[in-house]
Image (spheres, rainbow, N blue to C red):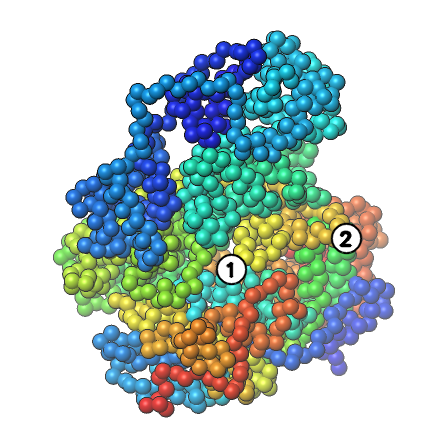
Amino acid sequence: MLNRRQFIKFGASASLVSGVSSPFNVMAAQSAAPENFYVFFQVEGAWDVSSFCDPKINESDAEPINNWAVGKTAKDIGIAGNIPYAPWANNAKQFFDDYHQHMLVVNGVDSQTNSHNTGQIYNFSGRLAAGYPTVSALAAKAHGGDLPASYLSMGKYSETARLVRGNRLGSPSDLVNIINPNSAINAGSYFPDDDWLKIRNAHQARVARLNEAANLSPRQKFNRNLFQQAINNGEQLDALSDALSKTIDPSIDSSNSVRDQFYKKIDITLGCFLGGTSVSADISLKGFDTHSNHDARHKTRLEWLIAGITRLWEKAESVGIADKLNVVISSDFSRTPYYNSGNGKDHWPIGSAIFMKKNAPWGNRVVGATDATQNVIKINPATLQEDSSDSGIIIYPKDIIAASRQLFSVDPNDTIPFGLKENTILNLFDASAQTPQIYDPRNV
Amino acid sequence: MINKSQNLILCVLTSVFLSACGGGGGSGSTNSGNTSPPAPVPTPEPTPQPDPTPKFSAELITFYEQKVASAVVQASCISCHTSTGIAKDSGLALFIESSTNTLSEDNVEVFHSYASTSDGAQKLKDYPRGLNGHPGANALGNDPVIVQDFQEFVDLLTECTTDCATPTPDPDPEPIPEPEPTVLIPQSVKDSVAYTHFSDNIANPIIQGGDISKACSDCHSDGGVAVNQGAGLVFVKSNDAEHVVKNYLSFVSFLIDNTKPKYVLDKASATIGHAGGNRVPVDSKEYDDLSLFLTSLNNQVAFTENISSQVVLKKCIACHVSGGQAPNDGATLVFTTSEEPNHLALNHQAFVDYVSSDSQRLNLLAKVRGDNNHQGQVQFTSDTDEYVALSAYVDSLAQDNPNISKVEFFKDIQFDDNRATLKRAASILAGRQPTDDEYARVVGQTDETLKQVIIEDLMTGDGFHQFLLRGANDNLLTDLLLLDLDQVSSLKATDYNYPAYTNKLYSFKEDDVSWYNRRQYEIPLNYAITRAPLELIAYVVEEDKPYSEVLTADYLMVNEASNLMYKGLDEDGVDFSDAASRRPYLKESDIFLPTTDKGRYLSTGPGNAYENGDLDIPLFRPERATQANNMKQAGVLNTFAFLKRYPSTETNRNRARARWTMKHFLGFDIEASEDRTTDPVALADTNNPTMNNPACTVCHVIMDPLAGAYQNYNDDGFYRARNGGKDSLPWQYVFRLKDENGDNYYANNDTWYDERLMRAPGYFHPEQGAATPAPDNDHSLSWVADQIVDDSRFNTAAVQFWWPSIFGAKPVLQPEDGGSESQQMLFDAQSVFIQQLANEFKTNTSLNAQGQNVKVLLANMIVSDWFRATGSSIQSSNDDVRQTALLDVGSEKLLTPEELEFKTKSLTGFEWNTKVAGVTNLEKTNLTHEYNIFLGGLDSDSVTERSKEVSTLMANVTATHAVEASCEIVLNEFSKPAANRLLFSDVESTSTPESNETEIKETIKKFHHLFLSESLTIDSAELDFTYDLFVNVRDAKLARISDGKSVNINEEGTSCPGATNANSNDSNGIKSAWRAVIAYLMMDYKFNHE
């Protein structure tokens, strides 16, 4: 016996010979399952990398860089494979132990600003000027332009430059409710399938007529075309219900806590990947702008971030798409290597970024470095070793974005109609080299 | 004869080339008129003459203007060293502006006087570098060039203490021989395009009649008919050896008397009355020649008269000069100083060269206004005479340039008529459909009439009120404070500052009131406090008050809930007894009235007035408190919601508040205003970089005085919150922060940070390049509000503030390097229109407005091409740039969730599951709550911009909406008497295609108009498609019934939750058919776009 959804599909096919001309029965061709998925974590507010992936002990405990480092020496710095980390957030050790093989840490990234807006634009698009798309939007355009929700724009900065449509999502249960508009999950009101099919066909035919009308203004033409694409892609949402049921957590569905909203974004992202409706996502976690009471507030956020990234990988593994995941983690910039008088940390332009991919040959490495007080150390672009000569370079967000594009398999020349200018001479994924770090317990 | 004007222009044109107009005494004034026979030299009117004995050498003045004025004085000194500044008693009080002399000479005089005092020169060298205890610290910054230049300037001053002046003219000079009566004009003029063209194509061919049937000079010369009848254009004949020069100057003189080239052309071609007839036909070569000459000449004259001294030499030359800051930064517009005899011609040509495209023209004007990353900030605001003259001048240059293609932004675009415009306006502004009477009043009428109906009929009621609240919140985002009562709400810390609230909470504690009941008190109170700034904006607009009052209002808005907190302990507060009757369309919680804040009590000690003691709840102690009666409201700026939405920290020091104040009310986003340094050393500077590091001061000199104006409000937004009630400074600063000597920065009675750490509270005036200090510390915020509304940018910001609410997209930003051509085109066109709107808004007095009336502004937006663009016949595929630029212009914008909710309710009465959303106190439906983010709405928190493009998920939400609405709409409609129905007034559920085909089709036709804004004929194909759906669904229903399925509209176990009491029997299939039609229409593209 056919269930309701199967029946609708069958009916839709049958309608092709029911007297309605074919253009009016456009059912979008099912896109091939994406080969890879792309996630960019936007750590909103500027994270303290000296307490995470670019660990700093104190030169003087009287004027500490980090309170957690008081009384500690370099040998107390954590190390997982080749990656030093701060022994601070409760789950940091587990995180680095579990994932260092799949992780490239880039330290000493100079964001060249201390303004949040500018830092977010620069670190998430590679440009200081507004209006340029995120790497995830580029990836959606390149690898999933035909998907119904190719780009999940759940980041703080989510510019698409009109290459693709950004999709913002609310709670998972609300998403489930609209996958099939003619279901009655909550309200109990829906059409008999036969009527619904007639309405859908008439609707699609009408949309096509509107789209073919003459003398449309550019806005009319553009918006009508978008609407037709949206309608025609609707059928591709069918697999989403089952996929979401494997990734979402009903126990946090109605929670509005910052942590749970972050987790929900991760769960929905995985469901949309698994369901074949999406190919990329920006996911932000807010609250890192800790100008006061830094230690308590920042540590909690860092633990949520680590837990969220872990959640992504573990759930991806459980539903069988971990091999396809490509992940970048970055932030506005970083925080000062000292405390202000309110026990907070202010803005500091020198930060870090992290790339992750399961079993990446370029994993278990750190590129770029900072000195004992988190100032940039220039590196040689070929050897990736410290190089204070004129040959040495500083890593900028544009280099991170260029590498992100490389990881996300985006060729901007094939994707967008304007230049991006984030070319880089760095090859961060050269597995043969890495940059020594000032605090590496193996050297003590 | 040469008249007075000719004489003056000869001075203008020759003075700069020959050093002076007649050598300073007028006796050498260039002679004019006929030389044969010699004419008497006319005695010119006395004219103001330049000071014959300039006190300082041109070298010194030039050095000052190029190296010191901008880089040092404007950038640093002027913030303190003015006659009213904090360094007014230092002996170095510089001029911000002088009405009697140039700024440069005045300020050099000040420096010179100071340098002349004992050790003055050395002090000038030391103090700006932060030495010898200069309170302004290192004002010169770390740029060695600036430091060296300033030292050199002081050296020049020192030399000047003995010999400043240029040589004084001999009081008894040898008599200067009377010059030959020869008309001289500089070679540069002779080389100009205008003169060359005149000499080649006008002087003989036209004036002397070489190529035309009759010479101009036949009548337009002494004794000629035209001159005898009073014509102002007087030539000499060709027998005058200097006729070319003299007749050229005649044109100069004629044009400078405010006569436009077109007048001359129209006369010569007899387009207007010309006694001499048609001497130069409009299609002739001579006409074209004359036209080209006159426009070129007119531009040169305009430059000489209106631009050179007023704009270029007064402002631009400080940086835009060879070796100056502007060319060093890459600017291509470079002027020549007045030292160069040819500077008039050269500088005019510099403009001609620069305005090589329309975008360059707009770019130039934008930079003058301080936009487009102009490093020199604002030089002239758009309401100044100088700007107006410059705008006219460069406009004329662009028109004169045949290489500049004029972009007609709306070419081949069609526009909505009044009826369609009114319908869309009603949907957006009022959330409803126009009435038949409203349609009738606008059809075929003027834009003024349309505007009048829009203002009088649509800008009223709850729909408009909600429109205003929504539009205001889309900018201010204060509704964030409604979302989570426990984390970020307007009530945070209020129990330690408002005793009425403190006491209320204490009584709850005493009475053991439940958590739930306490929430029922807190939720509406938080709503009331949070909505105060939005309600103030709505109040100002609805009451037709000048928009400036959103900042200058000395009152705040309260409803009955917040009235209890703000009224103080012993007062009655606002009387709400008749408030509901004035605005009956508002629910009680949305009725706000103005009052003043009398509820704030300061802890004046001894001890904390809100002592906690051993209790777990604050306890108010009146003996330790005093009413804060010195507070003064500054519109929205010191509402809790605004202050808490943009909280501060000890290190932020109100800068976020300053940033957003400038963004919302000056249209100035300081984060986008300057290129940021790429120098990591500069960015890592820890030596108080906001005061000393030029990479930082470039913005902080603007931002920090405004941040200081918020001095009386602490991080949580409370007035003078520190114990003692004297200030809101953080205790860490007061007690812990020490200077290099170990002394506290804080001093008794300080209300703001020490000036070594932060700039004094004030307001940065872009035109002055300096901040004006606030006159007192008590009311610095209300004072700064006055400054903002007096700033011409306030009017532009108002347009930008409301732009997205009408047009569905934010104003586009100036594209930076690498931006698209279409974005530039859109920006250019949009900038012009925004400026037009702003200029009109400033003084709008139409429709009984008294200036700065937002209703008129909104109406002007709606009747504009930008709103009404609705179709296009643009054919050329190579016009892609313009088509892309038009993507956010005109009709069919995606409706916001709120607009869709209003539209659905007004048309059908349907609301999709209305409920109070969480703790917000806001009634919302599924469209604006559960699916708000899906549909592109904002949450004022992590999502702060609306989507403007539809996605698959959005389309599924609107389809779900349609499915769930349609059953309820149809059943409820048919359960009412026909006269009470919104939709089915002309058909019944018994009306079948067999019996009532016409009525059904008429109803469908009406629906297409109501739902989709389509005007169909009864026999149109589109109507037939809908009718076919009706018939097909009905036939299917009948077929199912005949197969034994349910006669109820609800089949397969479905229900119609919102119409459980309605008759759901559908034995004839008509209700099912209408239900399908309603769903079909509500899913439609045009239902979701307006």
Q: Quadrant of residue B756?
A: bottom left
Screen quadrant of the N terminus of chain A: bottom right
Q: Amino acid at mark 2?
A: Ala
Question: Does B91 sit left or right of B156 as displayed?
Answer: left
- Most foreground residue, B6 or A277: B6
- Label 1: element kind: loop
Q: Position of residue B705 (x, y in %)?
A: 32, 50
Q: CA distance from mark 1 to mark 2?
A: 37 Å
Q: Is any atom of residue B336 visible in this view?
A: yes
Residue neighbourhood size for the residue with mark 2, other residues' Cα within 10 Å, grouped as few (<14), some (14–19), many (≥20): few
Q: Is any atom of residue B706 visible in this view?
A: no
Q: Position of residue B118 (x, y in %)?
A: 16, 44
Asked if the residues shown at circle 1 and circle 2 are in contact, with their CB atoms under 8 angstroms apart, the answer is no
Q: Amino acid at mark 1?
A: Ala
Q: Quadrant of residue A137?
A: bottom right
In front: label 1 or label 2: 1
- Most foreground residue, B986 or A306: A306
Question: Does B1075 sit left or right of A187 as displayed?
Answer: right
Q: Position of residue B954 (x, y in %)?
A: 62, 63
Give me the residue at 43% from left, 23% from top. Answer: B22
Q: Position of residue B1071 (x, y in %)?
A: 73, 58
Check residue A213 in the rendering and tell me which mark sits there, or answer none.
2
Q: Which residue is mark 1?
A: A129
Q: In the rendered view, would you say B11 is above or below B422?
A: above
